[in-house]
Image (tube, helix red, strand yellow):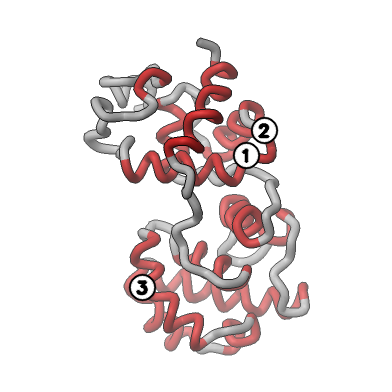
Amino acid sequence: MTRKERAQALATQLPRIYPTAHCELDFSNPLELLVATILSAQCTDVRVNMVTPALFKRCPAAADYAAISQEELEVLIRSTGFYRNKAKSIRGMGAALLDRHGGVVPRTIEELSALPGAGRKTANVVLGNAFGINEGVVVDTHVGRLSLRLCLTTQSDPVKVEQDLMGLFSKESWTDLSHWLIWHGRRRCKARNPDCKECELRSLCPSVDKPDRFLKK
């Protein structure tokens, strides 16, 4: 099976396996998703979702993030880890939204990626899930790991992995693809002790029973 053939088969199988796959960060508008995604760096979505209700109530608008003190914001987000840097980034993000975009979250990958604390991955999350715009594929640790195990790429750099995935899957599926792979990575193909025996993708996986075979050391 060629890489393209495997991608086509996965594009058929994954939505059947995970028909309700979605972003597991809680949000009700683009600004909330932007903040939650910044907080999710090296932190679980479950933990972020425990922190954001109080944060979103305290800061409902970009101006609130620009005005809140570093100290107060650190207290609100402390349990997400790296809270000092995250607080600095979120405050800078709020100020940048006010200065450059009238307090509104922009809809282009260039503008989103340029915000403090953001970057291409965060921009892809916001565009795909808040605006329904497929500009790229979100490559987190799960997507990167599964892309190697499924031989969809030989790369470990997220930017290069994303380019390979964009060339294999239709643009319309890019946002969903990241959800499918993330859900499979969390539920079946874990970093340690993946459940190859019960894996729904067993017949398509070149790494079955040898999950680290294609992972770069």
Helix, strand or loop at disc 3?
A: helix
Residue ID at (57%, 82%) = 65
Q: Amino acid at mark 3?
A: Met
Q: Is residue 161 left or right of residue 171?
A: left
Say which mark, if any, is on residue 10.
Answer: none
Using the rendered image of the protein, determine whether residue 63 is visible from the camera's viewpoint.
yes
Q: Label 1 neighbourhood size at 10 Å, few (<14), some (14-19), many (20+)?
A: some
Q: Which residue is mark 1?
A: 173
Q: Residue furthest top?
A: 1
Quadrant for the C terminus in the image:
top left
How far separated are the C-alphas under marks 2 and 1?
6 Å
Q: Quadrant of residue 8?
A: top right
Q: x and y percent of residue 39 in the render?
A: 46, 66
Q: Which residue is mark 2?
A: 170
Q: Label 3 neighbourhood size at 10 Å, few (<14), some (14-19), many (20+)?
A: some
- Circles 2, 1 touching at the beta carbon (< 8 Å): yes
In this rendering, the answer to whether 91 lies above or below 47 is below
Q: Which residue is mark 3?
A: 50
7 or 142: nearer the eye? Answer: 7
Q: x and y percent of residue 201 in the render?
A: 39, 26
125 or 217: nearer the eye? Answer: 125
Decide which of tag 2 and tag 3 comes sooner along the chain. Answer: 3
